[in-house]
Amino acid sequence: MKRRIVWASVSLAFAAVIGLSFAGGRPPQPKPDEFAALTRQFDYDATANPDVREVRAVPRSGYTIHDITYASPVDGRVQAYLLVPEKPGPSAAVLFGHWGEGNRTEFLGEAGVYARAGVVCLLPDYPWVRPPQWRKSVQNFARPEDDRRTYAQAAIDLRRGLDILLARKDVDPKRVGYIGHSYGAQYGAILTAVDRRIAAAVLVSGIPDLEAIFMRTDDPEMETVRKGFPPGRLEAYLAGISTLSAVRYVGRAAPAPLLFQFSNFEPNFPRQAMERYFAAASEPKSVIWYDAGHEMADPRAFRDRWEFLAGRLRLPKEPPLGR
């Protein structure tokens, strides 16, 4: 997450309107009318044809991996994997959000376990990891509005992914979950606040805002990054992107329950930031800490995600781990 510092942003004027502060601590929670303005960043035409196209189908034991693309409501097309189980529906569905440096393959193995259990899964790519004809550049620190368009699009494309899942006759609309890692966790906080179709969400290695990485970490590498910016440039960029900080949305996830998964040895941001993030979240919520790094390479994390979603999406108690 640290090497590809990417997040959505809006204009500095808009940031000033809602009264931002960079003195540290929890950002002020937006009032209802301010929150309505924030959510309009993720509006799109839900009636437009998603134009799903299959590139290839790869059969597996108990399910099929469909390599697909679908039309972004903003621009271009979205690459995604759609995993469809052999079991007849209606079934649960899970939307996955990968981390910033990854792509749609990150959760492919885990999604296969869900698919063997009869769950329809969708794993989209973000705009900055798509083929050249659809790819958007990122890290435009001098032009936060350029990044705003790209990262807002990522959230909108995930919402369109929900449309695709819920349009399927084999999906139960009351049993849709979300799993997101790092930037996927930030988008999960946004989605649960602006889109009530998610029944439960798991947020893995997430942060409340990018200030936690840029300004609140003692990582020597990030200290070097900070010194490399012209005076005021980093602060201006953070002001622009803070209106999409996860901490502004995570308090509005209810009634969807949230599971936070954090690392005791997180190298990119301090524990206080993670605790602040969890404290801001709406109830019901729970948190589990692991002896792992940002990648969350602890097999217990997968098991805990399964148990959390199993009780809410009516999945089997035990995940089908066979090949």
Image (tube, rainbow, N blue to C red):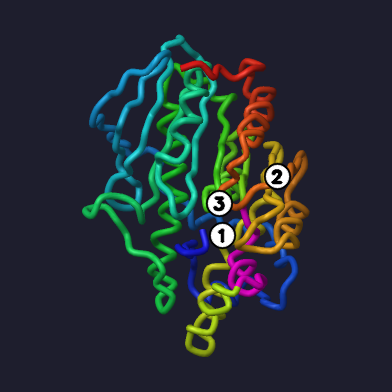
Circle 3 or circle 2, nearest the eye? 2
Q: Main secondary structure of the magenta part?
A: loop
Circle 2 or circle 1, nearest the eye? 2
Relative placement, left or right, of 32 versus 16 is right
Q: List the residue tagged with mark 2.
A: 290
Q: Residue at x 68, y 62 (%)?
A: 30
x and y percent of residue 194 in the render? Answer: 57, 47
Evaluate whether residue 204 shows in this view. Answer: yes
Mark toward the start of the polypeptide (1 vs 3)? 1
Total residue callouts: 3
Label 2 with label 1: CB-CB less than 8 Å: no
Q: List the residue tagged with mark 3.
A: 182
Q: Amino acid at mark 3?
A: Ser
Q: Amino acid at mark 2?
A: Tyr
Evaluate whether residue 45 shows in this view. Answer: no
- Dividing the picture into quadrants, the one containing residue 269 is bottom right
Q: Which residues are magenta?
A: 206-219
x and y percent of residue 19 in the render? Answer: 66, 74
Q: Is residue 322 above or below residue 124?
A: above
Q: Is residue 218 magenta?
A: yes
Q: Amino acid at mark 1?
A: Leu
Q: Residue at x 32, y 59 (%)?
A: 136
Crowdedness of circle 2 by 10 Å Cα count: few (<14), some, many (20+)?
Answer: some
Say what secondary structure mark 2 lies in: strand
Q: CA distance from mark 2 to mark 1?
A: 33 Å
Q: List the residue tagged with mark 1.
A: 38
Q: CA distance from mark 3 to mark 2?
A: 15 Å
User: Which residue is outermost to the top?
Assistant: 88
Relative placement, left or right, of 184 versus 53 is right
Mark toward the start of the polypeptide (3 vs 2)? 3
Relative placement, left or right, of 88 versus 304 is left
